Image (tube, helix red, strand yellow):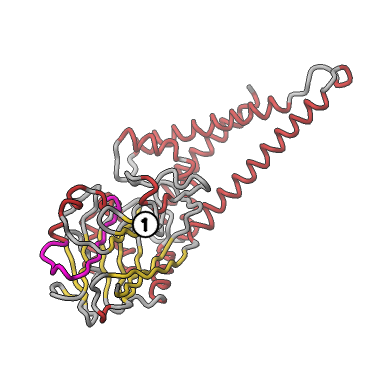
Amino acid sequence: MKRYRYALWFSIAVALFIVSAELLVAPLHSAGRAQAILGYVLGVSHLLNMAGFTIVQICGGRSSYAWTFRSLTLSVTLSSAFWGLAVAIVIRLRHKLSVPTAVPQADVPGTSSSISRRALLVSGGRAIAAAGMASASWSFFAEPRWFGVTHRKFPVRGLSPGLHGLRIVQLSDIHHGAWMSLAWVRQIVEATNALAPDIVALTGDYVYHGPQYVRPVARALSHLRPRVGVVGVLGNHDWYDNRGLTQWAFAKEGLPLIDNNRLFITPNRCIVEHAREGLCLAGVGDLWEDKCLYNDALGGIPGGMPRILLSHNPDVAEQPPFLESGLRVDLMLSGHTHGGQIRLPGIGAPVTNSAYGQKYAQGLVQGPVCPVFISRGLGMTVMPVRLGVRPEIAVIELVCA
């Protein structure tokens, strides 16, 4: 039993690390100090605390991630026990593989082959562990901040010649919070401005893990410089982390939110509240936390006017009230799924947060009544990792069909 003391010490170390991160590091991060470095510390803490965090979330039915003394204590206890058990199992397996045979090798035919098999198992285990560590390091340190810019041309029926070539840059699921620093958000804003957008479409989930991140991300996004304007809708996490504060902060920074509402782009490329020709930019509320009022967003618009619909959740494309409304939508812009955040070769994304599995995981797909473009997003939730799913800034150029 003496060899299992390492499992006990490891579980204690895990508990101390998680508690220190939550009580000491998290307040510094939310105050805006050294976020680029402290974000990694909080990310490691969250990965170590995943077992307990998940159980507490499931049992408590919580959609907010603020810790109470009771929930943090329970979560840390469960996670430290999990890691202690995991280390004990590893110690046990290693001991079994390293125990020599009780009979001298010279007296047992084939003993050398047994040793070779054992060595092969040990070497294979080490190789798998090394590959796993390499993948984990890449998904934690590199890929989440290696965003790419994707370009698409999209033909629109009835698009005014004055709007031919209109460039929409979509930003989705930024999730400024414990793992994504404000400096990284500013980098996204600079990259977006360099693309010379006419419209910036924000499709929700601006923060993660606390309302204290709402005002900073709104200020950062206020530095977007599209030629025509910015429009946005809220996502489920914006509701979890104080929907009212998000609406107030965005209004203060001059960032229009069009949940269950719309704005118009005139043929001479001005953004207005009412128009009889041009392009309609409409939005609906979040499917999980709000109401989707399709008539408020799309009703009463001239039949020949093209319209783009912003919906944080792509599953809106399959909702019976939307299908039965008969309202025209030329293109829906969505996010929410993060492309699954982890995508495995030959399997796809094990989890997509969509009721329709892989269909609405990412990219341009055809829904029942309209095409839907699902951005892979820029941030992360649940786990601070991305693997095989690079963050995305999407550029969509509208052209006359």
Tell me which residue sits at (48%, 44%) in the image: 47
Residue 383 sits above or below residue 172 on the image: above
Query: Which range of residues does the magenta coloring cover?
Result: 298-315
Q: Quadrant of residue 59?
A: top left
Residue 121 falls left or right of residue 132:
right
Residue hosting label 1: 175
Q: Report the residue at 56% width, 30% height from top.
A: 8
Task: Give the position of the C terminus as an image quadrant.
Answer: bottom left
Instruction: Assign a secondary structure to mark 1.
Output: loop
Q: Give the residue type that dot 1 points to.
A: His
| x and y, in percent, of residue 261 in the image | 16, 63
Query: Looking at the magenta stretch, what is its main secondary structure?
Result: loop
Eyeballing the image, is 373 above or below 383? below
Decide whether residue 22 is among the magenta residues: no
Determine whether 312 is above or below 225 in the image. above
Quick one: 105 or 277, which is closer to the camera? 277
What residue is at 84 percent from the left and 18 percent from the top? 108
For residue 42, say whether it is visible. Answer: no
Residue 386 percent across, percent down from the top left: 48, 52
Is residue 195 something that shows in the picture? yes
Give residue 329's position: percent from left, percent from top.
Answer: 23, 62
Q: Say left or right for 364 vs 288.
A: right
